[in-house]
Image: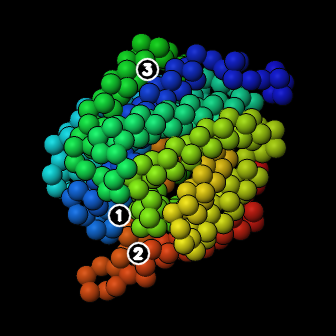
Amino acid sequence: MENNKKMSWRDLPRNVWVVTITSFLTDISSEMVMNLLPLFLANVLGVKTNIIGLIEGVAETTASLLKVFSGWLSDVLGQRKWLTVGGYGLSTIAKPFLYFATTWVWVLAIRFTDRVGKGIRTAPRDALVADSVNEHQRGLAFGFHRAGDTAGAALGLIIAMGIVWGVQGGSLVLTRSTFQTVVLVSIIPAILAVLVLAVGAKETARPISPNGKYPQLSLQGFDSRFKTFLLIVVLFTLGNSSDAFIILRAQERGLTVLEVMGMLITFNLVYTVISGPAGVLSDRIGRRRLIVGGWLTYSLIYLGLALSNTGGQVWLLFALYGIYYGTTEGAAKAMVADLVQPDQRGTAYGIYNAAIGLTAFPASLIAGVLWQGVGNWPGFGPSAPFFFGAGLSLVAVCLLIINHEK
């Protein structure tokens, strides 16, 4: 077996490169639009934070049910590529309809369809990456993929920032015409992403089950370590509400639309720089240590967001937030592959991604209610969701240290 210390991104196989380029182009498109969506809802449509939380939660959670099925189906069919292509294609078709959105229900329907596409593609895509590398390359492969994905996000934000500046200058609030222009431009990289994946990726060989049977669409048959890790991730995610609330927090603390976009670009640049080296590090020192460190960083950042007094403080904290993402996203996905059999990977990634997505609904809903309340029940203010997230992340860290076996 090749020494992992000598491996670099140049050694990664074709599929990892193709999937990374696809994610790079997709995130150029998605981040142009989706990071402005909370501001569009709040500034243009006049939607309250509890409804924004509902939109984010319903879209992510309902679509997440498909992640389990699509991952399992990719194991049964031995087909990762075309499920992935189909998922990216559906999201590309849905996105242009945001140009015509006039109500939050319309936005919810489009957001839901986009997330259905993500639900179809995510587990087969992750399994395609895992199938294409050996165990000593997993951290590197997923870290490289996350770096490419996030570099696309940064570039997308830079493009969107240029559009915002050209259309409305340094205005504090987002306008409809600006958002519509961003939506139109975002269609180009989305289409290119689907074409790159359809033409460039190659199907991997079907992983063979030791008993000759297909995996069940359930947690039965999975290692107890995977189940424990999954439970801890769910607990952590319950306090990890949509990043839309950080965007709203930044605006609430005085940042203009352009400054918010500058903040998002800074975050994605940090995320990009951290992801690759963190993936390599996870191959060397273990996934658990990186995840523990990342979750502790998350807790401190959320505590800082709760106590922040200025937009500049939120900007700095959100830049540091990239460290949390960079150290945990790729490592966690590599750990899933470590804890399951090769023939279970599609199903395992489906369950893992679905568990996170399903928990996103109560997480975002709780955050919105804590912030602004619901009905006649008042909320606790903008700091409350961040205190809640910081506390739950500490509990998750303790459980991961105590219960998880490498």
Q: Is residue 174 left or right of residue 252?
A: left
Depth check, mark 1 against mark 3: the one in front is 1
Q: Classify mark 1: helix, strand or loop.
A: helix
Left or right side of 238 for 56: left
Query: Where does residue 294 sit, x and y in percent of width and height?
Result: 68, 55
Label 2 sits on what residue type? Trp
Residue at (34, 79) in percent of width and height: 373
Please state the horizontal and vertical placement of residue 381, each as a whole percent of the image: 43, 79
Check disc 3 and give the amino acid type: Leu
Query: What is the secondary structure assignment of the residue under circle 3?
Result: helix
Q: Residues within 10 Å of mark 2 (few under 14, many from 20)?
A: many
**Who comes first in sequence, dot 3 or dot 2?**
3
Q: CA distance from mark 2 to mark 1?
A: 10 Å
Position of residue 194 measured from the top left corner of the image (x, y, whole percent): 37, 23
Disc 3 to disc 2, how far (Cα)? 41 Å
Report which residue position mark 1 lands on: 53
- Residue at 42%, 49% in the rendered image: 258
Given residues 254 and 96, the one toward you in this image is 254
Q: Nearer the viewer, residue 115 or 99?
A: 99
Q: Earlier in the sequence, mark 1 or mark 3?
A: 1
Residue holding disc 3: 197
User: Which quarter of the rendering shows the N terminus?
Assistant: top right
Query: Label for residue 371?
Result: 2
**CB atoms at circles 2 and 1 under 8 Å apart?**
yes
